[in-house]
Amino acid sequence: MNEARSALIVDDEHDIRELLVLTLGRMGLRTDTAPNLHAARQMLGTVSYDLCLTDMRLPDGSGLELVSEISTRFPTTPVAVITAYGNVEAAVEALKAGAFDFVSKPVDINVLRGLVRQALDLNTRRLAQPEEAGRLLGASPAMVSLRQTIGKVGRSQAPVHISGESGTGKELVARTIHAQGSRAGGPFIPVNCGAIPSELMESEFFGHKKGSFTGATSDKAGLFQAADGGTLFLDEVAELPLPMQVKLLRAIQEKSVRAVGSQNEVQVDVRILSATHKDLAQLVADGTFRHDLFYRINVIGLHVPSLRERAGDLPLLSEAILDRLARAMKRQPPTLASDAVAALEAYRFPGNVRELENILERALALADGNTIHADDLQLPAAVGAPSARPGLPSSAPATHAPSPGAPGPGADPRNLSPFDTASSALPSYIEEIERTAIQQALQENRYNKTKTAAALGITFRALRYKLKKLGID
């Protein structure tokens, strides 16, 4: 550690101050101490610190006041809060106020040392890389705000829940948070919670010992152990069954896991990021997602805007995607003709950035020459055509004759409209859209259902349900 680095310790208990001074001093830090908020504010006004440790309860106020002040006045100074043992609510409030992390009393020296190293590493990375290269493209207000928020939450150790529609780039946001934080040197472990069979979840998350169940032929480390020192990203966290939610909550709160078949718990140092396209608050109200787990993983909420909310970003995004695709194919990047740009801007993009990538990759393969025109995009006509009013097509395609009833099973959804006649059934129309999309995805993925679900942006469980509902073999 750099001996020039300094820390401010704020605690009204003399013994705690002495313990922290001794521990941090052995790590090479110069330390100042303050018994209350007043003394701490005076020191912060005259000295620049690399780290601050503060108790929650102080004689003249709350440590949360100090956290908020330092976050506002000295945003590059990480603040860690000391809380009473088991006071999870206080720890969560501290993280929401801007604290870097928290440590419980009685203070575990090893935990404290790890926290201090991560805080100082964060400053080292900030000095070496003043600003992370922009990985989330876009100049729209929604994207500018998202990048600013990511910069703030990257400094923290708080759990972050990322919400947004399928295909918006939630995993990219999670990876960016990881890359901009103190854990960037550690592993980033993504896991799709909907892709793990329920009977194997405990083993996958926490590991197992040899012989603990049929098929356990050797010891295996779980995802928590694999993410130790880094970040565990729980994608589609809403798909976790209730029994697993209980076990996950305990692992997050206790920062320890017990492998299946083991009698001992193992400490893990993991930051939790999670994501889903579903409304977790509504699932809590419905009783399908635990309120306490929601409270624990949703310390900081982050919404990723849909492509429809990112006005003006399409040309920049399209250019970047085409450039990347062309490099992979070792060819010159193509250009988008004006009619192609107009068609893309008129399209609603229900599949968001992921759908845009698929459309451009297909267009790159189909285009004659190095210019992509609107016809090369093959956008769904009924959805992509300009509308007389939001959500409604101005007219049906010329090749489509009005049908007196719901569309038949062989109809092309690009040439269908549920508004042709008063007797058209919207549910049948939507089912036909789903059926065609699923059948096409199955063919493209050679009827591999796991790959098909991933291509469609839904869980394997959801795909099985839809196959049964739509009568697709």
Image: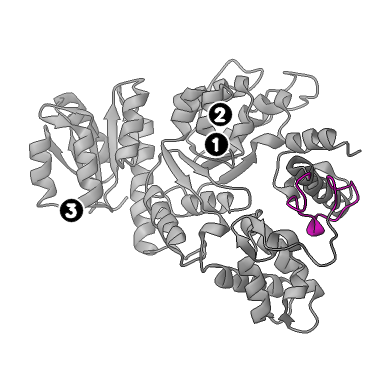
Residue 223 drawn above or below residue 452: above
Task: Name which residue type carries label 3.
Answer: Ser
Residue 322 drawn above or below residue 292: below
Q: Which residue is mark 3?
A: 48
Where does the magenta region start and end?
403-423
Front in this rendered view, residue 14 or 27: 14
Residue 231 drawn above or below residue 63: below
Q: Residues within 10 Å of mark 3 (few under 14, many from 20)?
A: some
Determine the CA span between mark 1 and mark 3. 43 Å
Q: Which residue is mark 2?
A: 283
Residue 279's disc is 1
Residues at discs 1 and 2 in contact (Cβ within 8 Å)? yes
| The quarter of the displayed image where residue 108 is located | top left
Front in this rendered view, residue 44 or 458: 458
Residue 311 drawn above or below residue 413: below
Task: Name which residue type carries label 1.
Answer: Asp
- Answer whether residue 100 is magenta in the image: no
Give residue 408's position: percent from left, percent from top: 89, 47
